[in-house]
Amino acid sequence: MSEEAIGILLETARSGERDFPETLEGRAAVDELLEAGLVEVFQPSQGDTVFTRQGSIQETIEVQTYASRPRLAITSKGQKLARRLAPHGAT
């Protein structure tokens, strides 16, 4: 797994979700993570309440730009790997 993919995995694991990367390197790293089943992509709708994979509820999102961007969400498999890769207590 590339260094970029590990960074994206750890960042996604910290909050349960994150923006889809815009760089070519970031997108290639996401492909690695998707193929391994460590993250999934979802597209929130304007006004949706977003549930993280860790079960917490984020505030209702009503910002148009948020709804127009795909998001990454951590899977349980990704969360387990992130715990092993992260410095103690980071996820």
Image (tube, helix red, strand yellow):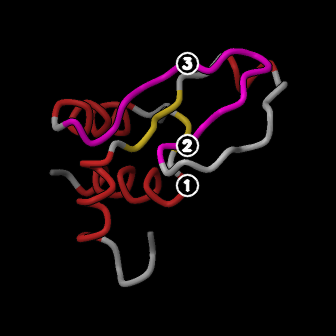
Q: Residue at x 48, y 22 (%)?
A: 42
Give the CA distance from mark 1 to mark 3.
17 Å
- Please give the count of numbered marks on the rendered protein: 3
Q: Are marks 2 and 3 in contact (CB under 8 Å)?
A: no
Q: Residue at x 79, y 20 (%)?
A: 47
Residue 64 image label? none
Span of residues in magenta: 37-53
Residue 49 belongs to magenta span: yes
Residue 43 image label? 3
Residue in front for this viewpoint, 77 or 65: 77
Task: Specify the quadrant of the image occupied by residue 82.
Answer: bottom left
Name the N-terminal-most of marks 2 and 3: 3
Residue 52 image label? 2
Q: Main secondary structure of the magenta part?
A: loop
**Along the horizontal axis of the image, is 61 left or right of 30?**
right
Label 2 crowd bin: few (<14), some (14–19), many (20+), radius 10 Å: some
Residue kind at label 1, given as amino acid type: Ser
Q: Residue at x 35, y 52 (%)?
A: 9
Q: Are marks 1 and 2 in contact (CB under 8 Å)?
A: yes
Which of label 2 and label 3 is nearer to you?
A: 2
Q: Where's residue 74, x and y in %?
A: 40, 44
Residue in front for this viewpoint, 10 or 80: 80
Q: Where's residue 84, x and y in %?
A: 23, 71
Residue kind at label 2, given as amino acid type: Thr
Dot 3 lies on which element? loop
Residue 15 image label? 1
- Residue lying farthest bottom? 88
Which of label 1 and label 2 is nearer to you?
A: 2
Give the CA distance from mark 1 to mark 2.
8 Å
